[in-house]
Image (spheres, grey):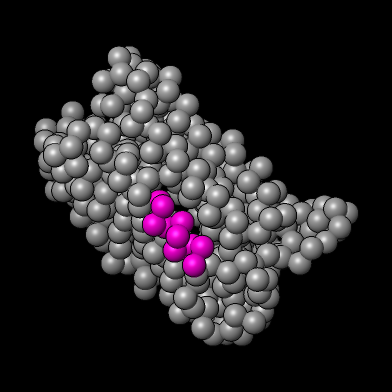
Amino acid sequence: MNQDANNIGDSALRSPALIALLVTAFFVALGFGLVVPIIPTFARELDATLDQAAAVVSVFALVRLASSAPAGWVSDRVGSRKLIIAGLLIVAASSAAVITADSYWDLLVLRGIGGVGSAAFVVGMGQYLILTIPNRERGRAQGLLQGSFLMGGASGPAVGGLLVDAFGLTAPFLIYAITLGIAAVIAMAYIVDVRGERSSPEADRALLGQVFANRTFWIAMFMALTLNWATQGIRSFAVSVYGIEDLDMTAGQVGWYLTVAALVHAVVLIPGSQAIDRLGRRPMARAGLLIYVVAVAMMAISASQGQLLIALIIQGVAIGVVSSVPAAVIADVSPGPVAGRIVGFSTVARDIGVVVGVQAMGSISQRSSFANAFWITAALLALAFVASLFMRETLAAEAAGSSSVPA
């Protein structure tokens, strides 16, 4: 059924549909966490070179990046519910098929197909939140969603390791497919069919033009790109290699440090997202980005394991404060009829940050030093902070207690 977002009211954060979406996100992240750590090993078992094994890891994100904008166009036409379910089933089918892969190319193609499904799910989910969550609750909704992904993603690697030890390298892919199947069933049962009002192509172009002419939208896009660059580049690459090679840490120590940072992130996330809905998007963006700059600058000058741990704890605070802001702002300025296309476009920016951030941190560290990689990342975050000084407040005036309005 179609449902008007204006009728959601105060119960949006407690609605069965949103709870179902959060459970779905948990299962998606759990399954993703199961398979990601063992993909390079599985590729090597299929006689892949190191470069080819790396390509299997990156193809999922690259295909998702390329598919996000088209997925947004589809979502505006068929509705977010159908796209969410289709995305889950595509990733489930491609993951189940991995157990039959007998060559590197089979694995590469199947992971690429999974990227298409991931784009569909992520874009459909983003559009759904725009259309069903009122302005005054979007920060908290984004925080809850991130919390679901965080809990699922943190649980996956440990469970995946146990599965590999007990049943072999293909077992996590099968369990991943099962978790996605469960998520699809939950989505079918509880997520309602919500879509923006239909409008003519000319009206859609005018609405898109209004969004693209909005300075605050582009600032939020830049924030999303920069935050994903910093977070993924630091957590997925820089800290691990820097800690082991420069600070004489063991892999186990690095893992514990990253776990502590993730726990701090989780603890701060919910009050941080609540503040986004109470104090406004703009002050939380500025506070979080400023804290993030301090954290990464501390990493650049860290000379001991203890200093690195302190910097990672501060980073966890920063992410908890600011990470929900870009999505909330983008949702605030997105008209319903073109919400899917806006989400698709913003997902591209976020994924560029993920892909380029990791590669850039590696390249700068290789050609210069880890310190310079951290300094350049801190400079980008500082630039995002400066940009936030020029963004308008998009939290509704009655929620923020001010007269600020979107651009």
Q: Quadrant of residue 41?
A: top left
Q: x, y (%) of residue 11?
A: 51, 83
Q: Quadrant of residue 9?
A: bottom right
Q: x, y (%) of residue 304?
A: 14, 41
Q: x, y (%) of residue 249?
A: 12, 36
Give the answer, above or below, for where 77 lies relative to 169: below
Out of 85 and 364, give the one closest to the viewer: 85
Out of 65 and 82, give the one closest to the viewer: 82
Q: Does residue 243 appear anywhere in the picture?
A: no
The residue located at (18%, 28%) in the rendering is: 245
Q: Is residue 184 magenta?
A: yes
Q: Quadrant of the C terminus?
A: bottom right
The residue located at (58%, 60%) in the rendering is: 81
Q: Does residue 244 appear anywhere in the picture?
A: yes
Label the magenta part by its dominant secondary structure: helix
Horizontal relation, residue 60 to residue 175: left or right: right
The residue located at (68%, 75%) in the rendering is: 4
The residue located at (26%, 20%) in the rendering is: 45
Q: Quadrant of the N terminus?
A: bottom right
Give the answer, above or below, for where 374 lies relative to 7: above
Q: Is residue 195 magenta?
A: no
Horizontal relation, residue 268 to residue 199: left or right: left
Q: What is the magenta range?
A: 180-189
